Amino acid sequence: MNEKDSKEQILRRSVEAKEIYLPHISADPVIFGFHQNELKVLLARMNYRKQWMLPGGYVKKDEDLDDAVLRILESRAGVTNVFLEEFGVFGKKNRSEYYFEDFDDSLFQKQRFISVGYYALYNSSELSPVADEMSETCEWIYLKQLPEINLAMDHREIIEKALQTLREKISHKPIGYNLLPEKFTLPELQKLYEAILGKPLNRGNFYRKIKNLGILKKLQEQRRGGAHKAPDLYSFDDHQYRKALENGLRNW
């Protein structure tokens, strides 16, 4: 889509938006995935300005905020069945106005918007993102690629805050249920923790601590196909995992 067409598209959406959505409030979900021992984040590249954005959107006048985020994710990226958690509010002046500086001030999208940030963990192998009409593409982008990505508005700040929140929660909440396959090895789980924390962990200490949490079940099978001894496979104990989510980790 060329620049002229993308601008006309935004103008049309502005007219519709004034009738449907609440002014001045939006939601920006940060969806993390894990692949090849690295974290990824779900981003959409917009038709307008060709910049990358979080797959966010606006809240309908007759809609709860949490319901709005689920609807936005499904319509903008094809994401369903995801557990989201609020982590912050972003309200710097001109955070969205500058992006639409080519438009008249009456544009709905150009008004001052305060955005509520949500984050979620998703198994990226189970999702092939689907872009909406406002986007050229919707893709998983590795976090290490973000310095080279042209991110719009304050979305880099939102992603960094979401990652910081995830790192803080990892010390008192279990992590991994939505990022790893159903069966996994302890080295794979350690790689996930290292990717989130951004640093290496001592293998012996990690194995001992993670086993003491009581959220894992050791399976009577091994991961075959490697050159070395086949490692044991584990899965999460659903009951203990959910209990730890509610009550926190006691032995970490």
Image (cartoon, rainbow, N blue to C red):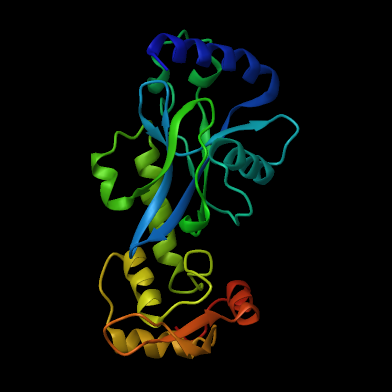
Q: Could you tell whether 243 is left or right of 252 in the image?
A: right
**Residue 42: image location, x then y, percent:** 44, 46
Q: Could you tell whether 150 is left or right of 165 in the image?
A: left
**Residue 71: image location, x then y, percent:** 65, 40
Quadrant assignment, res 65? top right
Residue 155 showing in the rendered view: yes
Task: Pick whichever, 218 or 224, lies toward us.
Answer: 224
Residue located 36% across and 64% down the image: 196
**Residue 107: image location, x then y, percent:** 52, 13
Task: Pick whichever, 146 or 90, lies toward us.
Answer: 146
Q: In the displayed structure, would residue 145 be above or below residue 101?
A: below
**Residue 98: image location, x then y, percent:** 38, 21
Q: Quadrant of the N terminus?
A: top left
Residue located 54% across and 31% down the image: 132
Task: Pick whichever, 36 or 23, lies toward us.
Answer: 36
Q: Could you tell whether 21 is left or right of 224 in the image?
A: right
Residue located 69% across and 18% down the image: 19
Q: In the displayed structure, would residue 99 be above or below residue 178?
A: above
Task: Pick whichever, 75 or 107, lies toward us.
Answer: 75
Q: In the displayed structure, would residue 204 be above or below residue 249?
A: below
